[in-house]
Image (tube, rainbow, N blue to C red):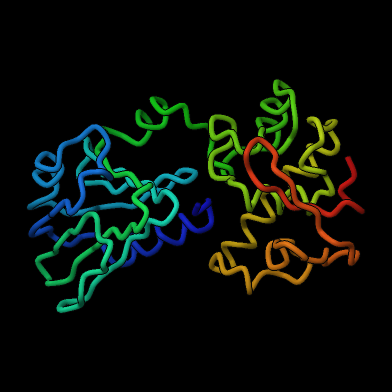
Amino acid sequence: MPELPEVEMARRLLQKRSLHQRIQAAAVRDGRILNAVSAQDLEKALVGRQFSSALRHGKRLFLEIDHSLWLTLHLGLTGWPLFLEKGCAEPRHTRLRIDFESGAALAFDDPRIFGEVGLTASPQSFLKERDIGPDALQMDRESFLAAMSRRRGRIKPVLLDQSLLAGLGNLYADEALFQSGICPQARCPDRQRLIALFSAIQEVLKTSLACHADFEKLPPSYLLPHRRPGGICPRDGAALQHRKIAGRTSYYCPRHQKE
């Protein structure tokens, strides 16, 4: 599933290519992506208007239609917005298509249909209704420490709780734990290790953004390029271990991420 860095790349694409263009037509190709809105109402809300801003919070995207109406977008597992120049063929798995008067179009391509499209009066109300917590790149250290102090249990599932910290998923949670030397099975650690974890989360997300969310461009000391069965720890050469934790496969180095 796309996590904060990948979703931010999508936001930048939308901001660069889709803003301030009048919408000529909108067509829902598959109603299964819609949440709490009909295809007719969504299409009506878009036609004749234009997007004026593109925001991201955690893994959620918001496109402003006017001051009191926003298009909401969740990429799910396989969704991605694609900008089509005039005359370009539509992707095979297009679930929503928005045509601009310029002749260009925006397609939401989603092969496995785990994405979600809807409308909201404001991003803030949407986030509150969904119980989505602070964005991982906007949360300050003391708020992070306070939130973590109220949690019990293994650290990996806590990091995946979007009501606590929005934007981290399975992959970047593993990377942050790897960089801070904390085993994903560990119980919530003490304050000093939580401070190290917070710093690692910030560094990992910012580094990924600087690399345009391309794992091949990450520093050689990062886990993600090696995160696979048979992978070797880039720090100390130990064989990486993996196991299911709260239903998610976690990778870690048993040598420097001891339980």
Along the viewing direction, whichever of 29 and 131 lies nearer the viewer: 29
In this rendering, the answer to whether 74 lies above or below 96 is above
Along the viewing direction, whichever of 255 and 118 lies nearer the viewer: 255
Residue located at (67% from left, 48% from top): 249
Where does the image place residue 80, in percent across and percent down from the top left?
Answer: 37, 60
Along the viewing direction, whichever of 225 and 247 lies nearer the viewer: 247
Quadrant where the image shows the C terminus:
top right
Q: Quadrant of residue 17?
A: bottom left
Q: How many labels does the image show?
A: 0
Extreme residue in the top direction: 150
Q: In which quarter of the image is residue 124?
A: top left
Where does the image place residue 195, in percent across and percent down from the top left?
Answer: 79, 39
Where does the image place residue 192, in percent across and percent down from the top left?
Answer: 86, 36
Is 144 positioned to the left or the right of 209 in the image?
right
Is 236 positioned to the left or the right of 36 in the image?
right
Where does the image place residue 81, in percent across and percent down from the top left?
Answer: 33, 61
Is 121 positioned to the left or the right of 125 in the image?
left
Residue located at (81% from left, 58% from top): 240
In this rendering, the answer to whether 172 lies above or below 248 is below
Residue located at (34% from left, 58% from top): 111
Residue located at (72% from left, 70% from top): 219
